[in-house]
Amino acid sequence: MVTLEQRIRTAPSFVRFALVGLIATVVDFTLFNAALAGQYEPTTYHLLLAATSGFTVATYVSYQLNARFTFRANRDNRALGRYFTIAVVGVLIHNGALLLLRSALDPETFIELNAVKAGALSASMLWNYVGYRQFAFRRR
């Protein structure tokens, strides 16, 4: 059971995580939209390629910022490997949710498609935070 003291101690890191996430989200959405520019109705392949590319670059940006500011951890190849292991599952959650939401909501505009992507991103956010905190940046 999580105590109130533990919740208070983790709140600042979650706030920092959210701010880093905002920066990474801007990177992700920028690359996503740039990759789909000019495509009125992107195919599933192009949609997943754009989503995965943006997510991957944003994950690297997020790793660098989270290691330094959120979790104040050393940045080394082992930590980067653990971080990307969590991110791989995160991208599977993200892309699965993206396809599910696209199918369910049938977005007709790029704004609607970006809203679908935002929903998919939120589906993977909790997984990423817990995984990064407990596995990637856990202090040994």
Image: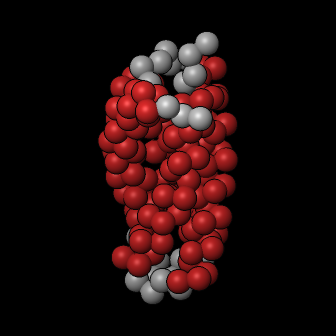
- The x and y percentages for residue 2 are 54, 34
Looking at the picture, the colour scheme in use is secondary structure
Residue 13, can we see it?
A: no
Up/down of 124 relative to 11, above or below: below
Residue 116 is situated, as x and y percent measured from the top left of the image, at 48, 72
Give me the residue at 56% from left, 39% from top: 130
| Residue at 44% in and 64% down | 118
Query: Toward which corner of the image does residue 44 lie, by quadrant?
Result: bottom right
User: Does 101 sit left or right of 22 as displayed?
Assistant: right
Which of 19/64 is in front?
A: 19
Q: Quadrant of the N terminus?
A: top right
- Of residues 124 and 26, which is closer to you in this image? 124
Please give the name of the residue rendered at 36% of the width and 26% of the height, measured from the top-left corner.
69
For the question of whether residue 112 can be seen, the reply is yes
- Quadrant housing the C terminus: top right
**Residue positioned 58% across, 58% down in the render:** 94
